[in-house]
Amino acid sequence: MNEQNKGFQKEEAPKTVQGAQGTTSPWKRLLAKRWVFPATYMAAAAIILTLMWVYQDAGKQAVGEKDLGIEVSSNDQPVTAQSSAAPDGALAVSAQPETMQWPVKDRTQVTVSMPFYDSKATNEEKQAAMIQYGDQLIPHTAINLKAKDAKDDGAFDVLAAMSGKVTAVEQNPVVGNLVEITHSNGLVTVYQSLTDVQVTKGAEVKKGDVLAKAGRNDLEKEDGVHLHFEVRQGTDGAALNPETILNDKQQ
């Protein structure tokens, strides 16, 4: 019986040792992985950074209308901080778009010698706006301006009707010397029948700058010394009646 017990003990003892060694904690198995510590470190770093951002955002003040230089008036209309400080309580008005003026110093000293051809005008008005060149009749796509007082051969200064960039300066055998100005609003003004041109292509001009003097051309030679003034929607766009655009008040 003792021998049997001894044999039983010898057999049971190894099982007990193996069971103790084989029962490993899941946490120990997890921590034994190589990627556990780097992953844990990155997660901790992310949490710390997130807390820092939250703390910094909490310390910032909200940006208000005054911080942006804008104030809201009592009638809910936004005004700039600068305009609210205008004298006498007046609000500064934003810059108005530039208007087009007559291309002469004094509108009262010139007359429209040939009008713009308007397809909606009467037959009499259409006939007055036709140019006869050789055996051809050409609709007049501009207005011609002549001096009322013909002193000094009727020459007068031709001014830029609006600020812009000189995009063409040409000498044409038919229409005479020509200056073209392209404006920021997309309109193009064309000045023909010129003499003594004072601007060059690429120059920036302001409204009222002297471009040239009125002269003669072959196309409208019957009109003598005059300015052919044309307004177009873009360089190759449709011609517009200048008299519907021009501002009668010289500025």
Image (spheres, rainbow, N blue to C red):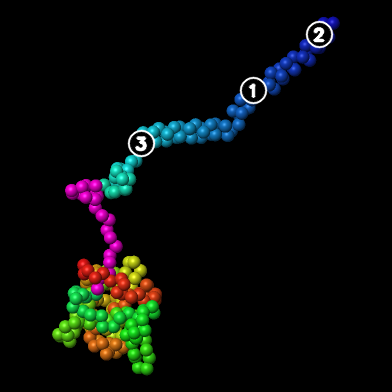
Closer to us: 22 or 65: 65
Main SS, magenta region, reads loop
Which residue is rendered at x = 31% and y = 88% of the image? 219
Query: According to the image, label 3 marks what residue?
Result: 60
Please state which amino acid type lies under the numbered disc 3.
Lys
Please state which amino acid type lies under the numbered disc 1.
Ser
**Please, is residue 34 above or below residue 8 in the view?**
below
Q: What is the distance, in whole Å, between disc 2 and disc 1 at their CAs?
A: 33 Å
Query: According to the image, label 1 marks what residue?
Result: 25
Judged from the image, the secondary structure of the residue bearing numbered disc 1 is: loop
Of badges 2 and 1, nearer the viewer stands 1
Q: Which mark is residue 153?
A: none
What's the magenta region? 82-102
**Magenta-span inclusion, residue 151:** no
**Please, is residue 70 above or below residue 192 in the view?**
above
Residue 70 % position (x, y) = 30, 46
Determine which quarter of the picture holds residue 209. Answer: bottom left
Query: According to the image, label 2 marks what residue?
Result: 5
**Magenta-span inclusion, residue 85:** yes
